[in-house]
């Protein structure tokens, strides 16, 4: 059996590992195993690639592997769960950038369609990968900046923004065709440069409320760029891996858009999710609406005598790093016979599955995590709902107010429960910048302060009851 045959067999094994890993990642119970199997597949793919006879110099490969591996290991060990969304955005952008650089290298190595051995399929693949990979790279960096709060989370817009972006897109397409049929390095670099501009310009007008959808969409773009690079290189494994990422990212984008009751075009071009803040006001007169507060001690007494408690986590829980105190509270109430579950909205947090990952880190049992469709029918029979750091995903305006920009977005209908307690630092609006009338409902009580400190005090008070 030749070396080439061994490489192809190794690629087949790696592809199976990627498929199984993706399948197992679809469930919290098997996600750890899926991640491990996918990592084994990647290791097999790397080793198989390194024994390819076309590799003539290992020096730079070893240097890059050591530097990149070291950086990755340090980041993976030190990153906080609150920073996971921006880390995902950053790593996704690096994947898109890598695909673009490989495509550019292939262009230089073989020339364009009319010059040497780069055929029609490869020429189209190279340009697609270079352009889409660059868009994904720049867009992901902007998403990272917004999530890291280096850039404002609100939409950043400018006059004739959509027209300008459309013109840039048309120019990129024309340049890509030109560079495909004739060797012209300056044209290629101009196309790549404009793609970087377009990626940044496309994400800047998108507000923080839409970040889960944007991350999923950019992930799909990176996968498609990688698949196109696979076509250009004739690498079957890269095609399979890219298609898996592209398909899963596309499906996730559709699911996230559906969960927000918004089309992808409205997410990409709607400039929604301003992250406005401000105190509660009522009507056009600006009169303050009533707010009822509760202390940890009073809440503790209410919780220990409840039959059913539902906890709704949001991004504020991640910011406060309060996942461990909330699990401790759930365990204490469970020991007293209280039925405690967690209701997870599909777009809670700043990336798909953010709350699931956060609670898994705190060892919250998987069977205690309920999806929105499972949780909503049970709220009328729930004694107390604890909303911790969530806002827009529990806003009744999405259901009741046709004039609200949230209208039509499926929500966790916590207002149907007997009592609601909201943990918040202040009366500031959520990332969508929309006032939440749940906070002024007579059945709602506000517990102001840092979520971690409030939950720690609440645990102590429950123990004292």
Image (tube, helix red, strand yellow):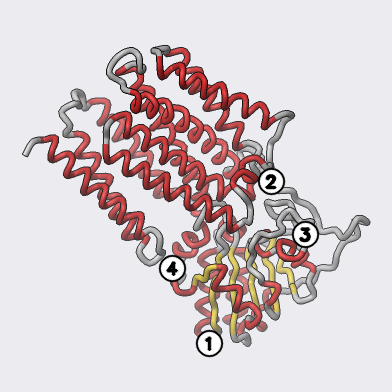
Q: Which residue is mark 2?
A: 272
CA separation in Å, label 4 and label 2: 35 Å
Q: CB under 8 Å between callouts 3 and 1?
A: no
Q: CB under 8 Å between callouts 4 and 3?
A: no
- Tell me: residue 451, above or below residue 167: below
Q: Which residue is mark 1?
A: 337
Identify the disc placed on residue 402: 3
Q: Earlier in the sequence, mark 2 or mark 3?
A: 2
Identify the disc placed on residue 459: none
CA separation in Å, label 3 and label 1: 41 Å
Give the residue displayed 56% in from the left and 52% down from the top. Answer: 350
- Tell me: residue 267, above or below residue 170: below
Mark 2 Cα within 10 Å, few/some/many (few <14, many 20+)?
Answer: many
CA separation in Å, label 4 and label 3: 40 Å
Q: Earlier in the sequence, mark 4 or mark 2?
A: 2
Q: CB under 8 Å between callouts 1 and 4?
A: no
Mark 4 Cα within 10 Å, few/some/many (few <14, many 20+)?
Answer: few
**Which marked residue is nearer to the observer: mark 1 or mark 2?**
2
């Amino acid at each position: 059996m030749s070396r080439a045959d061994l490489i192809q067999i190794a690629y087949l094994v790696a592809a199976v590992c990627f498929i199984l890993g993706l399948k197992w990642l679809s469930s919290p119970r098997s996600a750890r195993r899926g991640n491990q199997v996918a990592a084994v597949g990647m290791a097999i793919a790397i080793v198989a690639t390194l024994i390819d006879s076309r590799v003539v110099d290992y020096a730079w490969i070893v240097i890059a592997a050591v530097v990149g591996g070291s950086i990755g290991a340090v980041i993976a060990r030190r990153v906080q769960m609150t920073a996971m969304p921006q880390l995902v955005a950053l790593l996704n952008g690096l994947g898109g950038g890598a695909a673009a650089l490989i495509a550019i290298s292939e262009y230089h190595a073989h020339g364009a369609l009319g010059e040497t051995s780069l055929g029609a399929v490869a020429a189209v693949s190279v340009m697609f990968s270079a352009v889409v990979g660059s868009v994904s790279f720049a867009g992901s960096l902007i998403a990272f900046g917004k999530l890291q709060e280096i850039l404002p989370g609100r939409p950043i817009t400018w006059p004739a923004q959509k027209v300008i972006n459309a013109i840039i897109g048309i120019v990129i397409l024309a340049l890509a065709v030109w560079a495909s049929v004739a060797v012209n390095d300056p044209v290629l670099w101009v196309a790549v440069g404009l793609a970087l501009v377009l990626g940044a310009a496309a994400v800047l007008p998108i507000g923080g409320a839409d970040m889960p959808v944007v991350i999923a969409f950019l992930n799909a773009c990176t996968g498609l760029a990688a698949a196109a690079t696979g076509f250009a290189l004739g690498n079957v494994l890269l095609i399979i891996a890219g298609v898996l990422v592209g398909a899963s990212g596309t499906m996730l984008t559709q699911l996230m858009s559906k969960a927000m009751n918004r089309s992808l075009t409205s997410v990409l071009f709607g400039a929604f999710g301003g992250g406005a803040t401000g105190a509660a006001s009522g009507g056009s007169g600006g009169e303050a609406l009533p707010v009822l507060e509760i202390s940890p001690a009073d809440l503790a007494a209410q919780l220990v005598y409840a039959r059913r408690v539902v906890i709704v986590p949001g991004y504020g829980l991640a910011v406060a790093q309060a996942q461990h105190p909330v699990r401790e509270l759930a365990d204490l109430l469970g020991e007293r016979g209280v039925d405690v579950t967690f209701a997870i909205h599909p777009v809670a947090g700043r990336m798909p599955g953010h709350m699931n990952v956060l609670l898994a880190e705190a060892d919250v049992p998987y069977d205690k995590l309920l999806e929105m469709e499972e949780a909503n029918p049970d709220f009328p029979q729930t004694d107390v709902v604890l909303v911790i750091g969530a806002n827009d995903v529990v806003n009744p305006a999405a259901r009741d107010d046709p004039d609200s920009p949230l209208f039509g977005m499926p929500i966790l209908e916590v207002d149907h429960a007997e009592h609601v307690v909201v943990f918040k630092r202040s009366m500031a609006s959520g990332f969508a910048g929309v006032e939440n009338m749940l906070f002024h409902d007579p059945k709602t009580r506000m517990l102001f302060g840092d979520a971690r400190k409030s939950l720690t005090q609440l645990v102590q008070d429950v123990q004292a009851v």
